[in-house]
Amino acid sequence: MKTSMKPVVFVPRDSGALSLGAEDVARAIAGEGAGRGVDLTLVRNGSRGLYWLEPMVEVVADGRRIAYGPVDAESVPGLFEAGFLDGRPHDLCLGPTDEIALLKKQERLTFARVGVIDPVSLDDYLAHGGYEGLARAARLGAEQVVTEVMDSGLRGRGGAGFPCAIKLRTVMQTAADQKYVVCNADEGDSGTFADRMIMEGDPFVLIEGMTIAALCAGATRGYIYLRSEYPHCARTLKAAIAAARARGYLGKNVLDTGRQFDLEVRVGAGSYICGEETAMLESLEGRRGMVRYKPPVPAVCGLFGKPTVINNVLTLATLPIILARGGAFYKNYGVGRSRGTQPIQLAGNVKRPGLFEKAFGVTLREMVYEYGGGTASGRPVRAVQVGGPLGAYFPQSMLDVALDYEELAARDGLLGHGGIVVFDDTVNMAEMARYAMEFCALESCGKCTPCRIGSTRGVEVIDRIVGGQNQAANLLLLRELCDTMTNASLCALGGLTPLPVLSALKYFPQDFGLGDEAAGEVR
């Protein structure tokens, strides 16, 4: 971003902020400035993730950014009257942005630039440390890049938690005349929006991460598979890709290395199952999104039958920080085998919804109360679902569990994409369990019987249990059905659907109309 003596005002262009009126605020600020004869610079940044304060407007005053929010178009004239362009006090003033408590307490690594820069300005990206990781990766060479990523402990942030370095090394060591890097940006889990925030707020970090992966693995072509519900992402990504290509960061001679890599955005057709990597590959190849049998794994036989690195947005967007600062730097964050940071998305019945990037090890209780402020309704928290629609439900008594791959797995849960959805004491957990089965039935690709038929039968069995029909037999049938889905489904959709069902049954049996004896058997 060019320095200027003109007042600089930041208004988010992020979809979340736009849904809360950010576009009207931007127009109002531009119009009010023009009407007052003020020549100002209006920068459309990404959201900081503090959605209860959006639209959050920032101004540069005395070398610092001062935040105001939530701002609506009607409050803009009053802000001008109060002198907000100079950072003056106002009822909406939040003080210096970097001193806002819930921003200051985060460990912003992957999201270091989101909300700070103009997302489509390559110069702004470079001024904030952009492409330092790629430059170092080009100097190190492929084997050393894999070593750095391995040392960092980075695991796939899409949900499976598979070590990123193993995928890179497998593709690197597999001989082929063509290799690919595919970013799975089909972010479809309920309560998740971290991928969207990266793509809308710092798209160059994703492009840089994919380029690092490509140079390491020997890939020359890349694709970002984007869900159709993200039109703002598509526009931002395409603009950033064009800018990177024009400056030599993509194309036939990346950074004068003699290496080739280019990429493009492909928009899906709105199918949840295409978040599964092999169904996504089918869609990319122009076919209906259906799960493939494995082996072979995509790292050996992926897109068009060629070795393919597949990771989600957060994983690829983390590679630049690891290569720029070193694997040991990244590994210093986190606990156990869960290293680094996790962008945690708080949604549902919560007072302060938003995105918070924290080192692994933070507890559910800290996230729900310290960051989220408890329920928006003011009623007690009853359940928290972690990991999207296929994640387990945790009761109030289990909120001290740490957000850590192994600790969650030990409690029959999963971290997934880092989404947390909060429910108060008015929720009916039998209805939520039924919804999990219904969701699976609606979104199944239909290839395997346990998922396609099991989920449909699951809805019927839950209805019978809630209706009081032969509960003991139907409870046994539901458990056997869940066991079959877990162990015989081709992919995680059918395989993980039992998690929310069984956790709801275990911790909230009264919602299913079960008596004390039946409830004891469930536990």
Image (cartoon, rainbow, N blue to C red):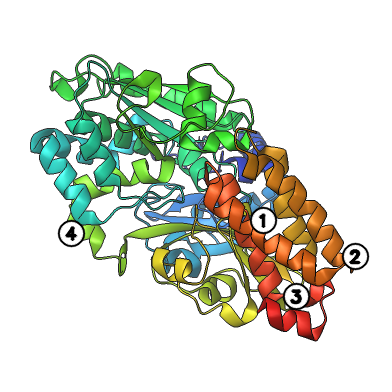
- Upstream in the sequence, badge 1 or badge 4? 4
Q: Residue at x 75, y 60 (%)?
A: 432
Q: In the displayed structure, would residue 336 be above or below residue 274? A: below
- Location of residue 486 (image quadrant): bottom right
Callout 1: SS: helix
| Residue in the foreground of this view, choosing between 91 and 291 | 291
| Residue in the foreground of this view, choosing between 507 and 83 | 507
Left/right of residue 155 with respect to residue 73 in the rendered view:
left
Q: CA distance from mark 1 to mark 2?
A: 19 Å
Q: CA distance from mark 2 to mark 4?
A: 56 Å
Which dot marks residue 481?
1
Q: Residues within 10 Å of mark 1 (few under 14, many from 20)?
A: some
Q: Residues within 10 Å of mark 2 (few under 14, many from 20)?
A: few
Closest to the camera, between mark 1 and mark 2, is 1
Q: CA distance from mark 1 to mark 4?
A: 45 Å
Query: How many numbered marks have been drawn onto this rendered protein structure?
Result: 4
| Residue 28 visible in the snapshot | no
Which dot marks residue 347?
none
CB within 8 Å, label 3 to label 2: no
